Image (tube, grey):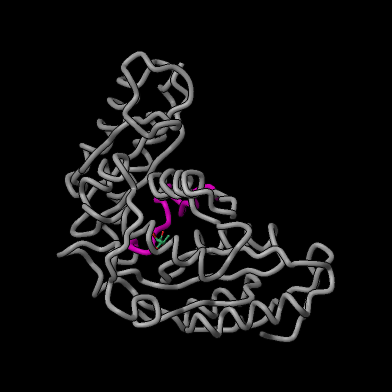
Amino acid sequence: MNEPTATHGGRVNVLTTPDVIDTIAGLRATLAEAGERDSGGRPRLVLVPTMGALHAGHLALVRRARELGDIVVVSIFVNPLQFGAGEDLSTYPRTLGEDVAALATVGVDVVFAPTRQVMYPHGPGSTRVTAGNVGTLYEGAARPGHFDGMLTVVCKLINIVGPDVVVFGQKDAQQVFLVEAMLADLDFRPVIEVVPIVREEGGLALSSRNRNLVEEQRAAARALSAGLAAAASVAGRGAAAAEEAARALIDAQPLVKLDYLVVVDPQTFLPVAADHHGPARMLVAALVGSTRLIDNAALDLN
Ligand code: PAF
């Protein structure tokens, strides 16, 4: 690990180039050593799981992680278990050098970037954490097995790193719901911290897949966030009015092929009843060209 260069919250932290570690044993040794060096008791460890191709949304997760703990570990692993046949596993951007440079600007201690061989030495294995019914809806309906693969790797990463806190972005709302459920249902130790969506000017939610969009598609994709904003502005009239407002804007964009638009109850993540009152969340997914985009927003249905 680098020599400490700054203090944070009364403890010593590192704000230079992070250590990049690609083995489980190496990671554990580094974290154990850092723990021993820390004189203020057991350091608080925060994990930010990512698949790399980092953007400002990821850096917001890391900044929050930095506030919450003493040692920040960012994992970078494009997890094959969460990609289905015909999805973009082979073309998913892999930009480790750029990612590490970006992470150095926000004070990450360790980048854990294992190979597939390290994570799945005997192939994908047969054990899975299953996401249950909610895992088969919305993104799960479009991407069968995606959430089981995601939860399985998050479970592995938590077991490998041993964090006190795991940080996720609100942009993947269904992922957040399912990770929260897993942590609670299986009595995991870490708590989850959820960071608000970061949007570019014009409203498009930041995503590693945005880099696949040409300018015309990027402009059209703004209909998703515009639709969500329109829905939020009429949410006082109920879920149907919110859906109608969002659809009107999204359907007006021929380059945007809506997959689903749904208003869910944040407690159950199931579609709300027509007369639902109170907090809700609108989820949207669409294909823009061959790029799948998702977004969501809180609604107050009164
Ligand atoms: O959100 C992601 O990037 C991935 O689903 C995650 C949580 C890193 C698991 O592979």
Determine the residue positioned at 73% across, 67% down: 43
- In the image, the segment drawn in magenta is 195-210
Q: Where is 179 relative to 93, above or below?
A: above
Residue 292 in the image: state x and y as whole percent.
25, 55
Ligand 1, by image quadrant, is: bottom left
Residue 242 in the image: state x and y as whole percent.
35, 25
Image quarter of residue 189: bottom right
Please, what is the dominant secondary structure of the magenta stretch? loop
Image quarter of residue 177: top left
Q: Where is 107 relative to 152, above or below?
A: below
Q: Nearer the viewer, residue 58 or 40?
A: 40
Q: Where is 294 relative to 123, above or below?
A: above
Image quarter of residue 118: bottom left
Q: Nearer the viewer, residue 63 or 4?
A: 4
Determine the residue positioned at 37% across, 60% down: 152
Determine the residue positioned at 39% across, 41% down: 296
Determine the residue positioned at 29% across, 70% down: 125
**Total marks in image:** 0
The quadrant in which the N terminus is found is bottom right
The magenta stretch spans residue 203: yes
The magenta stretch spans residue 257: no
Q: Is residue 261 left or right of residue 113?
A: left
Residue 102 in the image: state x and y as whole percent.
54, 75
Residue 141 in the image: state x and y as whole percent.
21, 45
